[in-house]
Image (spheres, grey):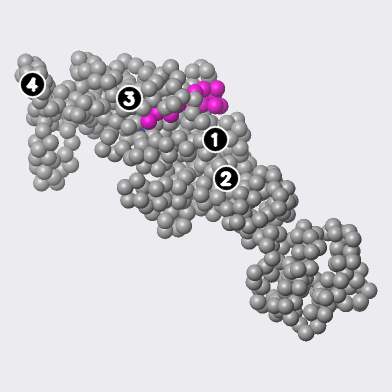
């Protein structure tokens, strides 16, 4: 069984992928890899009206960024391609016809106008219009027209759709997460499977492709749960083995009330898309986790906990660890609240977890972008290692460690005032002499020399240490002051003290 696991992520390229969509992709990926199976990307682009330029690339870029690659999909042709439904459109009509032949579907010739009329009439009676077993025999379709009339209409090119005719019964279904579900199929409508423009609807294309691509498990968002009955009935009508289904919980607003939307992110200042997205029509830019500074490892970890938990205290998981720990049994059926603070916590954990060289390389790149010279990458790595515990994003390193690269441009007024009095300039001139005379310019060497001098002068440490830190950093923050002095070097330390003497003395 385990080698037969084939799952798919089947987004419609109608815009940027929301984190909910990326979570669906991740859970499919984890499930596939856990069972040595295949993870497929299928682009469901049959609805040309909703097609958005760039959306497919965005989806692929987002998967690549998170390092959850698909095994088969556009550009990675396997044995079941093509993987874009628009390139498969010639395949679907035969399946729709097959259902008509089997009596499970029928041609419907109703015009848009007639349907609108029926809808208005129903609404006037305060009823919702639904085209199904209750009224299908009052419409113009192959169930009400004579066979030769149907043929004639088709031959003369009349527009028609193909509608499904659900068998009336109590349908027993099983969802891996929600368990047994019972549906009275008389409540369903006669869904259009094939449109008058010659394209299948989502339902037909989705089921046909899942069958043809030998999908073993359909893992998708809860918003598709209402379609499950129709899909199961379609499998029954085709007499195909149905895949297992698992509907992942909704991702909710931080308040827990309602689905998380882009608007919530805008209002509260967080991203709901993995990558930045520029709307091709309006030009509007939506921010992304990547550009906000999140690491892909953090993104994956955040997504994993939206609806799943390992059942233990462990919270930090790499993709590999997730593959081992993941199971559909541990996915919750109730909605998963998105907590932006928790997301930052995951990011902080992964940020600190990084190798100094890796975090340093990212910081070096950021320094370069701001035209700040940094010496060598090794230097940046050491600096990064000294302060990274207090950072969440690379961007934070500027504040925490900017003084390792540039002399302070301003001084923290309150503390500068406290640190500098009439006697300070003279003291600092002597400190400069001590520094210049010190051969050992390591942190320990500088510390020993300066502290030795302070002791020999019988001075209080604060009188030296505070101004020294203000001169080097511009404020009272930062790691050990001798470490800083040693890192920036004796000359630069002396320069900074002299500047501070001029500006603050
Ligand atoms: N094309 C659907 C979507 O955009 C796929 C739903 C499914 O996975 O069946 O989410």
Residue sitting at x 91%, y 68%: 452
In space, the residues marked 4 and 1 are separated at their CA atoms by 53 Å
Dot 4 corresponds to which residue?
156
Marker count (numbered): 4
- Residue 403 pos. (x, y %): 69, 62
Cβ at disc 4 under 8 Å from ligand 1: no
In space, the residues marked 3 and 4 are separated at their CA atoms by 27 Å
**Sequence-first tag of 3 and 4:** 3
What element does badge 1 sit on?
loop
Q: Is residue 41 magenta?
A: yes
Image quadrant occupied by the C terminus? bottom right
What element does badge 3 sit on?
helix
Q: Is residue 37 magenta?
A: yes
Dot 1 corresponds to which residue?
67
Dot 2 corresponds to which residue?
295
State the image quarter where residue 51 is shown. top left
Mark 4 near mark 1, Cβ–Cβ under 8 Å? no
Q: Residues within 10 Å of mark 4 (few under 14, many from 20)?
A: few
């Amino acid at each position: 069984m385990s080698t037969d696991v084939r799952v798919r992520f089947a987004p419609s390229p109608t815009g940027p992928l929301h984190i909910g969509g990326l979570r669906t992709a991740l859970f499919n990926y984890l499930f596939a890899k856990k069972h040595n199976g295949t993870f497929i990307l299928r682009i469901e682009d049959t609805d040309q009206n909703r097609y958005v330029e760039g959306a497919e690339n965005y989806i692929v870029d987002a998967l690549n960024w998170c390092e959850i690659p698909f095994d088969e999909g556009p550009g990675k042709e396997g044995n079941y391609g093509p993987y874009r439904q628009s390139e498969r459109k010639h395949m679907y009509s035969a399946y729709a016809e097959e259902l008509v032949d089997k009596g499970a579907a029928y041609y419907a010739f109703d015009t848009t106008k007639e349907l609108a009329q029926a809808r208005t009439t129903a609404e006037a009676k305060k009823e919702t219009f639904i085209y199904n077993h209750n009224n299908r025999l009052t419409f113009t379709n192959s169930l009400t027209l004579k066979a030769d009339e149907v043929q004639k209409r088709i031959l003369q090119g009349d527009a028609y759709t193909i509608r499904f005719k659900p068998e009336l019964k109590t349908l027993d279904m099983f969802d891996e997460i929600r368990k047994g579900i019972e549906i009275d199929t008389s409540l369903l409508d006669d869904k259009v499977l094939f449109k008058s423009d010659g394209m299948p609807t989502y339902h037909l294309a989705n089921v046909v492709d899942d069958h043809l691509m030998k999908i073993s498990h359909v893992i998708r968002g809860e918003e598709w749960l209402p379609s499950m009955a129709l899909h199961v009935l379609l499998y029954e009508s085709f007499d195909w083995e149905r895949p297992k289904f698992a509907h992942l919980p909704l991702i909710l607003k931080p308040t827990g009330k309602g689905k998380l939307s882009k608007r919530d992110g805008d209002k509260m200042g967080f991203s709901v898309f993995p990558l930045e997205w520029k709307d091709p029509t309006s030009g509007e830019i939506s921010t992304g986790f990547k550009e906000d500074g999140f690491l892909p490892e953090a993104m994956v970890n955040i997504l994993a906990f939206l609806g799943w938990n390992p059942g233990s205290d462990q919270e930090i998981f790499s993709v590999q660890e997730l593959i081992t720990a993941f199971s559909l049994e541990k996915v919750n059926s109730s909605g998963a609240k998105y907590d932006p603070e928790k997301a930052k916590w995951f990011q902080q954990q992964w940020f600190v977890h990084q190798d100094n060289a890796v975090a340093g390389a990212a910081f070096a790149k950021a320094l370069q972008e701001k035209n700040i010279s940094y010496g060598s990458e090794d230097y940046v790595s050491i600096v990064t290692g000294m302060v990274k515990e207090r950072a969440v994003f690379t961007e934070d390193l500027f504040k925490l460690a900017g003084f390792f690269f540039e002399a302070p441009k301003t001084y923290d007024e309150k503390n500068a005032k406290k640190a500098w009095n009439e006697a300070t300039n003279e003291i600092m001139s002597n400190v400069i002499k001590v520094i210049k005379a010190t051969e050992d310019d390591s942190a320990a060497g500088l510390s020993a020399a300066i502290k030795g001098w302070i002791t020999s002068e019988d001075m209080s440490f604060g009188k030296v240490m505070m101004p020294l830190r203000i001169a080097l950093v511009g404020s009272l923050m930062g790691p050990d002051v001798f470490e800083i002095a040693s890192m920036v070097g004796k000359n630069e330390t002396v320069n900074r003290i002299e500047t501070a003497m001029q500006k603050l003395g």
